[in-house]
Image (tube, rainbow, N blue to C red):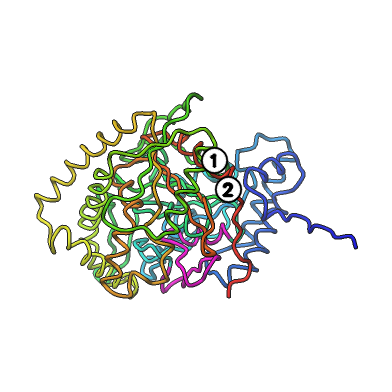
Amino acid sequence: METHTPAVQPWQLTATELAAAIRSREVSSVEVVQSCLDRIAQTNPRLAALSDVRPDEALAAAREADRAVLAGQELGPLHGIPVSTKINTDQRGHVSSHGVAALAGAPAEDDAACVGALRQAGAVLLGRSNAPAFSYRWFSTNDLHGRTLNPWDPARTPGGSSGGASSSLAAGMTPLAQGNDIGGSIRYPAACCGVVGIRPTVGRVSGWTAPTWIETPEGRTQLHFPATVQACAVEGPLARTVADARLALDVMTTPDLRDPYGVPAAPPARPAGAKPRVAVVRDIGTVKNHPAVDQALDAAVARLTEAGYEIEEFDGPALLAEAARLWSLLIFEDFRPTLPLVNQVGDQGIRTSLAFSFAAVAAHWGERPSLESYIQGWARRGTLVTRLQELLGGHRILLTPVSAELPFEQDADISGPGRAAELVEAMWPMTAVPILGFPAVTVPSALVEGLPLSVQIIGGRFEEDIVLDAAQAIEDRTPRLTPPLVIG
């Protein structure tokens, strides 16, 4: 009996494949967007990954994209391709709710710089991806938009804070997603859902956005970004493949001096040459890895070795351990003045999570760290940045776990103060990187116990090409991971 393979639907294609197909008129943007809308209708009611999906608006943009193709106009790299944006990032005409009802006021009047770059590249903006309230959890639940589920296992977190982005990508709702990262919020969700996430060097992608205002009982107040957000937070892409992540990063690379840390020009691509050495950091001596985490690292080492990379042990775990501890001091002290607002307008989840997290951090720094400790922490940060750059030196990259644990059980951070403290310790690979501002990518390397497991690759500042090359080598030798289509 003859069997037929079902035709591939547009939502199943990568962004790179879709860009070529739209450009060559093999498929229209309308067909692609409609396919993604159908996929959203099929999967989003269960996953709650996207909100504020506007089919009419998206299809109108797709028709404009198709007219440009037929007219022979110059096309951007993402012409006609659907991309989601995060609920904490301004998109013109859409509310930046941050998962908080008090912030779900007037629609944004302008795009954040990174969203404007996606639009300028021809992307069709399709849906707002969910995140935790105030984007300060490794989970993606809030009272305004609900709980986002992981397509692999609904009992596990899809990651946070860009969990809606990672869940929607894994389920095929869009081929690309915009996210941001100050403590793993791009890299960790990508790993939890078996997709790719790249955290760029601070300054490569503009973090500029229009001023944010909030209505409180005391009146209208402007929110200001603290020093750690300016120095450590980045915008970046999540994607289903390394090639797509590279494509989106190129688009989002936006020289912009409105950003306090913005660079004046895009960094030049590194010329092809000898592969860098890969220094493996399995742990920093503070927490034991789950056996599956070591299995994922072993798989990545084997694939990089096969690709011709030289593997070595790294002699600087203490540096990363100190960076992770420093993150907990500077990030949380910068967030402390926001606690009254969180307690006033935040949901119970974020209030409990922050209370437990502050208690965990107090084990290292005390209940109320001194101003002297805070100042010295910023000074020490500069030394650590220099030291790590010297250790990498343009000829070495680091291979680390994503976390010491499997993707956390849902709401693990609010199950008790002891468990919350364990999470902070387990996430050292996610927290050590942003406080130093280096680029890092997470890429799947194994399927263990029915869950995707990823590794993290860290490179020197502005060496995104190098870490993406190594991620590509792993991806090329790893079977494509596809989550179950039915969420039980």
Q: Secondary structure at mark 1?
A: helix
- The image quadrant that residue 105 belongs to is bottom left
- The image quadrant that residue 54 belongs to is bottom right
The image shows residue 304 at horizontal and vertical percentages of 50, 39
- Nearest the viewer among 51 and 370 is 370
Q: Is residue 124 above or below residue 411?
A: above
Quarter of the figure that contains the N terminus: bottom right
- Nearest the viewer among 437 and 398 is 398
- Nearest the viewer among 456 and 52 is 456
Q: Residue at x 54, y 40 (%)?
A: 472
Q: Residue at x 30, y 46 (%)?
A: 230
How packed mark 1 is, by other alpha carbons closer than 10 Å (few <14, some 14-19, many 20 or more), is some
Q: Which disc is residue 478 wearing?
A: 2
- The kind of residue tagged 1 is Gln
Part of the protein shown in magenta: 141-170
Judge whether residue 264 is colored magenta: no
The residue that mark 1 highlights is 472
Q: CA distance from mark 1 to mark 2?
A: 10 Å
